[in-house]
Image (cartoon, coloured by chain):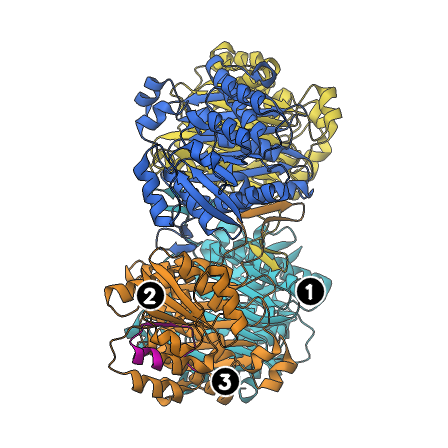
Chain colours: A cyan, B blue, C yellow, D orange
Amino acid sequence: MLRIAVLGVGRIGRMHAENIAAHPRAALAGVFDVYAPAAEEVSEKLGVTRFESAEAVFASAEVDAVLIATSTATHADLLEQAVAAGKPALCEKPIDLSLSRVNACATKIAGSPIPIMLGFVRRFDSGHAAVRRAIADGRIGDLHQVVITSRDPGMAPAAYIEASGGIFRDMTIHDFDMARFILGEDVTEVCATGSRLVDPELMARCNDYDTITAVLTTASGKQAIISNSRRAVYGYDQRVEAFGSAGMAISENRTLDQMRLYGAEFTHRAAPLKNFFIDRYHDAFAAEIGAFVDAVEQGHQPPVGFEDGRQALILAEAAIRSAAEGRSIKTSDIG
Amino acid sequence: MLRIAVLGVGRIGRMHAENIAAHPRAALAGVFDVYAPAAEEVSEKLGVTRFESAEAVFASAEVDAVLIATSTATHADLLEQAVAAGKPALCEKPIDLSLSRVNACATKIAGSPIPIMLGFVRRFDSGHAAVRRAIADGRIGDLHQVVITSRDPGMAPAAYIEASGGIFRDMTIHDFDMARFILGEDVTEVCATGSRLVDPELMARCNDYDTITAVLTTASGKQAIISNSRRAVYGYDQRVEAFGSAGMAISENRTLDQMRLYGAEFTHRAAPLKNFFIDRYHDAFAAEIGAFVDAVEQGHQPPVGFEDGRQALILAEAAIRSAAEGRSIKTSDIG
Amino acid sequence: MLRIAVLGVGRIGRMHAENIAAHPRAALAGVFDVYAPAAEEVSEKLGVTRFESAEAVFASAEVDAVLIATSTATHADLLEQAVAAGKPALCEKPIDLSLSRVNACATKIAGSPIPIMLGFVRRFDSGHAAVRRAIADGRIGDLHQVVITSRDPGMAPAAYIEASGGIFRDMTIHDFDMARFILGEDVTEVCATGSRLVDPELMARCNDYDTITAVLTTASGKQAIISNSRRAVYGYDQRVEAFGSAGMAISENRTLDQMRLYGAEFTHRAAPLKNFFIDRYHDAFAAEIGAFVDAVEQGHQPPVGFEDGRQALILAEAAIRSAAEGRSIKTSDIG
Amino acid sequence: MLRIAVLGVGRIGRMHAENIAAHPRAALAGVFDVYAPAAEEVSEKLGVTRFESAEAVFASAEVDAVLIATSTATHADLLEQAVAAGKPALCEKPIDLSLSRVNACATKIAGSPIPIMLGFVRRFDSGHAAVRRAIADGRIGDLHQVVITSRDPGMAPAAYIEASGGIFRDMTIHDFDMARFILGEDVTEVCATGSRLVDPELMARCNDYDTITAVLTTASGKQAIISNSRRAVYGYDQRVEAFGSAGMAISENRTLDQMRLYGAEFTHRAAPLKNFFIDRYHDAFAAEIGAFVDAVEQGHQPPVGFEDGRQALILAEAAIRSAAEGRSIKTSDIG
């Protein structure tokens, strides 16, 4: 049993705490949150220790590893502390909104054998992972194009958007990682376009976009196309398509149930899509914990690491610049 | 070019006339209808001869073969005349509503080499035929169960229902033939159930049903399940499922177009099903003409013949008796 | 928190124990199994009491309710003990293989206010339940036909089959309950057909069938069609279709993941179906526990009770007789 | 009956000739081809006049209108002759590979009331047209993103590719028109990326691409994403997705038949996609003829005209430049 403490028990941290408690090979070693009532509630409900500080967590002999789900600005510091304390860490994305902070963190932890895993949970979705596996098994031949559709079911609150670092760093970052996961090859160029269609006023105020397209290219000419919207009324739209010389693999959406309705005006009508990430990626979040436990217990590097977090951020930086300048940006010009 | 004359140019005969005219290896040799204005209209529109009588058609040296689409009561007589005249015939189903008349006709034409084909058009549907082919190719192993769903988009006019011979002889007859086509083996027992749910009053008056289920069994224990309704508001429901020891093949419905709509309350919403048989089986009707031309030109027996028409009627008789008596009926007790 | 003890921790009892432990409003009060090592393993893994006997469970002040997942022959006795002890019970199906034993049990517990719930888990499946809701909401108008397809992914071991009471009591019983759930109206007549196609030798030895069709009729003429096979190589086939005067609702199958593959020979190729009931009905089993907790806590009768178990068995008896005698059986002639 | 002569009876011209002959309100007035044997074969098969020259066609009093399906280089000349002769024309795309030639032609025919229609057949596909209609009816709210997937089933012969004018002018031109059709608003900016993945050698020799992505933006920020490949092994991939503030409409692919196969390793397996344009857009080609006949007979402008052909070419020019320069190109900088 790997004893994992959770740092930060907001919506996502709390879910992670429950998943750890339910995992057959993991145990919840306790929780910490700067907002004590949140930690108290979770510690009581799940019957585990509430730590008084992050330092107390890192110092505890009862904690084998940590899951970092605090606010973004603290991720890099906590990762550095985790490495210093010799505690393997599973850290929510992004590492930081600033690439230079990420690079500084990378320098600091370089050479450490402590496993660091990034929470790009979508890699653990059964459908998306099956697409990756189909490619790895040669079932679609050489990969030519990847099409990632990723649309949130509804706009986040203005306060969230304002602090998010912008759509590319906050939302598309998952798709940048997915593109890298599926492409299996470094992206060399990014061309992005942003529009303000869902909430033009808020977007203008934040100098942000709510509707974007990004086209990524690799050295060998593989293309990945990402389309995002901050609001899809029909639910959480999450599709991945991989097109190759010998076929295509598509990871399809998930509806709320499998019922289809027929009437005088229509056929095959299904329920809206699962909404939101905690439902849609429910099984993937559990699988993510499992992958972290495996990596720590078997002493190998996690399937998605710090450098994956850094590379996704580089793509976000390139996309931001591309959308602003109306031209393709080479990733070698970033970072 | 096989020169085919069409006898009877109501809705279905007219469609056949157009299909023959459009077929690359067939020519429309003329039309006849007891209601002269109907024949006149078609003959003018398609620029072909209007014959004054069925006899004139059979006597004509310009006619190589005939398509019989007259009213049911005349089919057997016209088939006998066709055989006597040495003209191959494609005859709409059913041969007759009376099994004894069919048997008498069978006796009369027995031994004749003139090709007689029955218009069980569904055998020529690309989806249903693909199911049959999947079985023949061994792709689903040994066949165990067949499930045929067949629901009309709307109740026919009362006058039609009254003269139809009842749902089993009029509507299920297509499904009985489909069951035989898919089973590839003689049906030995029939168990049927009928209800009056769509138009109870009309059904009671006609001593008929509008909603039926029939279960057919073969000597080896294969089962075929047919469900019919006279009215499906979502369109013409036409599905065939074959389940076997190594898999399953399903011929799915056809929607009016391939557009799917997503909204706040639903996803994957498609158009109603194609409606009605002239649209749904459009390509199958053309393929049926092709199969008839092939059989006549190449001198082999058509893929669906007089005996298939007779066997389907035997199943209808068995079903009628089963529904009335509340017990399974052996087909050997019929006819 | 409702403290529930589990009696019988074979495959299904163990799953129930884990579901209870994971349920937010339930607690696992302990386990018992006549085979002590099984109970020991589960009690250790989940950190709960192992009871020495069923009597000890019923006597315990720490137990609010019980879940009965022991062998079928013990169900009726344990239900009677539960009622005597005043412990609400959730009991796996069937109550007993013998209708007279079920009737005796019914007499014994008659009048007791203790909630008894039957484990017809499929009622809690999101898709099947959505079909029921669509009917209740009037979205398909008056119900005319129900089509239930239910095929196991593989034949159970011979020893299981031999003791099962036959396919109608063991397997179709779920579909009889589903038919009643969807029909919302008493079945008055049953017509069933059985074949030996998957393992003819074993079936002959057990005087049983592996492939069956059953047609149920209600007083108003509604029809329910059930088709079962003991082995579907493509996975656990579980579909429910409800056809009505204003539309149709279909609960579709579940594939292992949502990935679709395209190649030179095919398109839309998906993974096999979920296999087996613990996976397919994973969420339904959890919802079932929730419904039991709700009923007990809120003091109302559970959504599926003892009488539902008895009625399903009556349909099984009618089907057995129908298949043997080749005629429809009135349910009023049973029991 | 509108009497239409066909100029050019290669593969596509011949299909048009047959469609005209089969159309209820059109008649085939004759054919012409610079390669006399081709014209002879078609004229014999369809029983119509073979004209000796284009001039003879334009001079004939038996010809009400023309369909131009000759080689691309002759389109503009023939259009000018048609206008001069007062014959409405339906012209295959593109008008010319050179935008300046197209502009010169535009100047020459400016002001003429003679109906000129461009053969962007996909606008007449029932699925794509239903997407457009869903937008027009407000069913998906304000349009935000359009995703067009368009992949040919196989690489054209090298000789064809060499003379094609490049993928953007030859293949993507259809998708540029589709984007304009769906967007319903002028494209202001184009950003395109091209790769050589299917046949790198041939593409390098022709300075062409076989795999492209193009992102189009309108003044209001709507985005259209086009992905093309010269070879999809699973068939002719033709999808159109429109995403808006209130929903989404998707025009799905067409499989060869509607049969689905299930086996031990898979479920829902369908046939390959229809292949190629003459099959996939069979009904659309017929509808296109109908729209042309309507426009001429009712004296209104055709639904897709000369200017649509010119605008699609402008987008192609912009894409070519964008792919070469690695930056967005404003359409106002073209032409």
Residue located at (54% from left, 28% from top)? B84
Q: Are marks 2 and 1 in contact (CB under 8 Å)?
A: no
Please report, as a chain letter, where disc 2 is located: D
Magenta segment includes D82: yes
Magenta stretch bounds: D80-96
Q: Dot 2: within a 10 Å radius of its alpha carbon, few (fewer than 14), some, or many (20 or more) residues? A: many
Q: Which residue is mark 3?
A: D323
Whether callout 2 and callout 3 share a subunit is answered: yes
Q: Residues within 10 Å of mark 3 (few under 14, many from 20)?
A: many
Q: Position of residue D83 (x, y in %)?
A: 31, 79
B9 part of magenta stretch? no
For the residue pair D302 and C227, the one nearer the viewer reads as D302
CA gap, disc 2 to disc 3?
Answer: 35 Å
- Left or right: where C269 falls relative to D190: right
Viewer-side residue, D279 vs B35: B35
Q: How packed is label 1: few (under 14 Cα within 10 Å), some, or many (20 or more)?
A: some
The chain to which mark 1 is attached is: A
Confirm whether residue B122 shows in the render.
yes
Tag 2 residue: D292
Q: Which residue is mark 1?
A: A138
Residue D180 — which label? none
State the SS at label 3.
Answer: helix
Of residues B124 and B100, which is closer to you in this image?
Answer: B100
SS for tag 2? helix
Q: Nearer the viewer, mark 3 or mark 1?
A: 3
- Observer-side mark, 2 or 3, equals 2
Q: Amino acid at mark 3?
A: Ala
Q: Is residue C216 above or below residue C267?
A: above
Q: Earlier in the sequence, mark 2 or mark 3?
A: 2
Cα–Cα gap, marks 3 and 1: 30 Å
